[in-house]
Image (tube, helix red, strand yellow):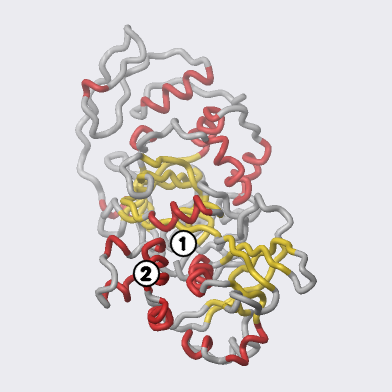
Amino acid sequence: MIRGPIRCRTRRWSAALAILGALSGCAGPQHAVREPGSSPKAATVASPTARPTPAPAARAPVDPEKLLNGEDDSAGRRVLQRERARWVAADWHELPGWGQDRALEWWPALLRSCEKPMPGWTALCTQARSFRPGADRDATAWLMRMLQPYRVESPDGQREGLVTGYYEPELEARRQAQGDFRVPLLAPPQDLAQRKPYDTRQQIESNAALARLSLAWVQDPLDALVMQIQGSGRLRVTERDGTSRWVRLSFAGHNEQPYRSMGQWLIAQGELRPTEASWPGIKDWGRRNPQRLREAMWANPRYVFFREEPLPDLAVGPRGGQGVPLTPGRSIAVDKTSIPYGTPVWLDTTEPLSTTPLRRLVMAQDTGAAIVGAVRADYFWGWGEQAEAQAGRMKQPLRLWVLWPREAGVTAGAGGAAGAAGTAVDR
């Protein structure tokens, strides 16, 4: 049920009119709706009595000073300037696939962000907690009443970018070194904060004395490296008494050394082609070249340390940079100087290694050292084998729209406080 009256008036966003009119029982003309760039012949007419939408009047010259200062300009579009991005006001029908997403699946991710609302979101989060959408279109209509969409661009106007994927690894582990379980996952050394930069990966992995810091031991050094890059992982640990339990290792710091991509190193060495430098390809190379594995790994001097946390509920994701649990398929990592934590985002991309559209609501709840720029995101796939496969292959073109409170100021949410895991990891 929608709270409050919805007025029926003709707007340029006819797709929004169709959704809100159906929900509120408002009468009014329904015009043909099509996505930007599609053929007029492909547009479906909702009513046999519908009349053509009149052509919009020519716009007067835009005042750049007003727009860049975030002011309304009836001749142009509202533009909000951020540190590494600019947001350009958009109409709802410009969001490809808008209204077709399962918005109820996304709603819990919004409520999780509202546990730690960013500046400008307190009032809206209060309303979100009290609203109980019964269907996808209820949640969609609520968003359209409360928020304004903005297209995300780089400062020079670039609208297209890149989306990659990440996940939470699941590994078998032992509490002590035994058999094939000889690769340690370390807690931070006591002097980590005093020595910047700390020792390199090669120095740390060659220092047998650091084994006393081991939280658990795994079998594959590449699995340990992947876990460091992803920032957290789930371990099914066999204890010293033979019992086993699930725990989570979360990011606790790194050695302040620069991050170097192992995939890029393998490409530069002529070991892999660019199309092969996904994590499945890198792991396959490691299995075929065990004698060179250490050399390849040591090309990346960055080393990540962990802390252990209980994992009582296997359905709850790791905490991202905002400090709230991530939701598979509904959380993304962003450059928080472009998109603040806790912002709803409409994502337009494709499934990994395909042209199948992936268009949906997500929440900006995390960050990563490699996630830099305006139209850039890392899509959280979850955990398990399927998530690993999808994340390892995802490198797709991307367009983004943020959904921002209508009453929020231009600079609201510009900072974005980091949560417990707020330091950027290596993705």
Q: Which residue lies furthest to the right in this view?
A: 241
Position of residue 407 measured from the top left corner of the image (x, y, whole percent): 51, 44
Q: Residues within 10 Å of mark 2 (few under 14, many from 20)?
A: some
Quadrant for residue 192, please give it: bottom right
| Towards the viewer: 256 or 47 | 256
User: Residue 47, labelled with which disc?
Assistant: none
Specify whether 271 is left or right of 243.
left
Specify whether 7 is left or right of 238.
left
Quadrant for residue 182, please give it: bottom right
| Sequence-first tag of 2 and 1 | 2
Position of the C terminus by quadrant: bottom left
| Between marks 2 and 1 in the image, the one whose residue lies nearer the viewer | 2
Q: In this orientation, does residue 265 appear? A: yes
Mark 1, residue position: 336
Disc 2 residue type? Trp
The structure residue drawn at horizontal position 34% and vertical position 48%, both measured from the top left corner, is 399
* Placement of 159 over or under 39, stated as above or below: below
Disc 1 residue type? Lys
Specify whether 107 is left or right of 8.
right
Q: In this orientation, does residue 411 appear? A: no
| Towards the viewer: 161 or 237 | 237
* Placement of 71 over or under 218, stated as above or below: above
The structure residue drawn at horizontal position 47% and vertical position 42%, both measured from the top left corner, is 361
Position of residue 118 measured from the top left corner of the image (x, y, whole percent): 57, 56
Disc 2 is placed on an element classified as helix
Mark 2, residue position: 285
Disc 1 is placed on an element classified as loop
Position of residue 300 measured from the top left corner of the image (x, y, whole percent): 41, 80
| Towards the viewer: 225 or 260 | 225
Position of the N terminus by quadrant: top right
Position of residue 299 measured from the top left corner of the image (x, y, whole percent): 38, 82
